[in-house]
Structures are given as structure tokens and as C-alpha cells.
Image (cartoon, rainbow, N blue to C red):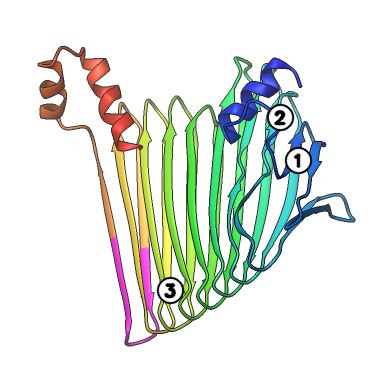
Amino acid sequence: MDAIQQQLLEAVAGFHEIPAGAYNIRANGQTAARNSSANIEITPKEDGTGIEIHIKPNTKKESVHIPVILSQAGLKEVVYNDFYIGENADVTIIAGCGIHNGGSASSQHDGIHRFVIGKNAKVKYVEKHYGSGDGSGERIMNPKTEIEIAQGGYMEMDTVQIKGVDSTIRETTAKLEEGAKIVVMERLMTHGHQTAESRFKIEMNGKGSSANIVSRSVARDESHQVFFSDLEGNAQCSGHTECDAIIVGNAKISSLPQITANHPDAALIHEAAIGKIAGEQIIKLMTLGLTEAEAEEQIISGFLK
């Protein structure tokens, strides 16, 4: 891989070289490298639209990397990846997409990830999106995540988009059975004229299921963000959705949380807070020797951690 592709891999997957264990690296619409392990099998779909990842029951403390990078301007693709996590497994899945666009044509990656999580299995899913390049062509990413969690299953989802993505629609749906749980932390920043739309639809169908959806975002300059969250309680369950956002400059942010209780023992909460950085926070940091711009960056960095 060239230097640009290596830099993209480091940004979205955090490694400087091919990792140990199971992995699938996709570069400019093609498979660049793939490896299965004894407990994690990665196979291409017959129609060429993506891959299937099968994780054996009782697999513990293993990981799989599936980054996607685009460095060819004008490339557009749709990829379908399906994950089947066996009962009692405990694994980490590291995904993400990086686009470098140095040309005038738009580059776009739409990734549809489907998760079927078995009974009492645990999954930590890390997804990072990143854009770079000084071309006028847009960097577009539209991730979609579809999740089914069986009895007692658990999924932790850490999704980050901090830099360089001009347009994104981020969709997450989940269906939870008895005792299943999902925890989501979304961190998002836009600038310039970028747009970002996040949509969550969570159905808690089993007794004792729960969901905690938290989004923290910063919108700068003339950018625009929209956050939709819909929690549906169809059994004795608990759900919480929260959107905290900071506006800098002339940006715009909309938050539309929705909760629906279809069972008398469904306990659901939604929270939303949007505003600018408080002046006293800036002044306090400036008294410690920071410039106004440095103080602002310090506050935003801490907010998005």
C-alpha cells in the first residue's frame, strides 16, 4: 500500500501493519488482504457485494479488523457485511472507513453491516470514519447498522466521525430479545458546509432488555446536523436516549428524540441539550495562559472524549 492508504488505515483502524488474527482489508473497491483464524471465518459473498464473518460459539477475547479505505477519486461503492456471533462469544470488531479525495469527483462508500448476536454473546464494535485530501470532490459515507440480539446478548457500539466527511447519513436499527442490551456512544464533528444525519431505531421486545443511546456532537462554521432517536418498549424494559451538542459559528443542529411505550412496565427516558460554549469556560482557561482559540479547542476535545 502507498503512504496515503497506510495513513487512512492508521486513522480508521489504528494499526501500522497487517494485524494478527482475523482481518479483511478493502482498498479502492477490492480486497487487499484477508485472513481467517481458528475461531473466526471470513468468506466473500457469492455475488461479490461483501463478506460474511462467522464467529464460533464460546470464542473469547479475540478480535477481527474490517477497515475500508478509498484513495481513488470518483469511486462509489455499496458493501454488505454480515456478522454471525455464536453463543457465549466475547469479541471485538474494529471497522471504519477512510476516504482520501484529491480530485474533483465525489467519492462515496455505503457500508451495510448486519449483526446476528447469539445468546449471552458480547460484542464490542468500534467504527471510525475519516476523510482527507485537498480535492474539491466530496467525501461521502453512509453507514447502516442492523442488529439482532438474542437472549442475554450484549453489544457496545463506539462510533466516531471527527474530521473530513462532507456528507453522511448514519442509520442504526436494533431488535432486542429477553435480557439483551445495547449501549451506543456516538461522537461526531462537522465543519465548513458539511452535513450529518444520525438515525437510531431500537425495539426492546424482550423482558429485561435495555438500551442506552448517547450522542455527543460539535457543529462548526456553516455545517448542519440532525439527530433522530426512536426507542420502542414492547415489554418490561428500560431505555435511555441522550443528545448533547455544541454549536460553534453559524452551524445548525436539530434533535428529534422519540420514545414509545407499548407495555406498562417499559421505562423510557429521552434528553437533549444544544448550545454554545459558555463564556465563563473560555475565560477560565484563558486565565491559565491559553488563547481564546486554544481554550475553545480544549473544551471541544474534552467534550468529544
**Residues rendered magenta in the picture:** 258-270
Q: Is residue 259 magenta?
A: yes
Identity, as a three-letter code, of the amino acid under mark 2: Leu
Please identify the quarter of the rendering in which residue 235 is found.
bottom left
Name the outermost residue toward the bottom: 264
**Residue 157 % position (x, y):** 49, 53
**Mark sitting earlier along the chain (1/2):** 2
Callout 1–callout 2 Cβ contact below 8 Å:
yes
Name the disc covering residue 70, or none: 2
Horizontally, residue 17 falls left or right of residue 208, namely right
Q: Nearer the viewer, residue 286 or 39?
A: 39
Q: Are marks 3 and 2 in contact (CB under 8 Å)?
A: no
Q: Gap between marks 3 and 2, in whole Å? A: 37 Å
Which residue position holds label 3? 232
User: Disc 1 marks which residue?
Assistant: 77
| Residue type marked 1 | Glu
- Position of the C terminus, as image quadrant, is top left
Tell me if residue 167 comes above or below residue 262 in the rendering: above
- What's the CA distance linking mark 1 and mark 3? 32 Å
Classify mark 3: helix, strand or loop.
strand
What secondary structure do most residues of the magenta stretch adopt?
Answer: strand
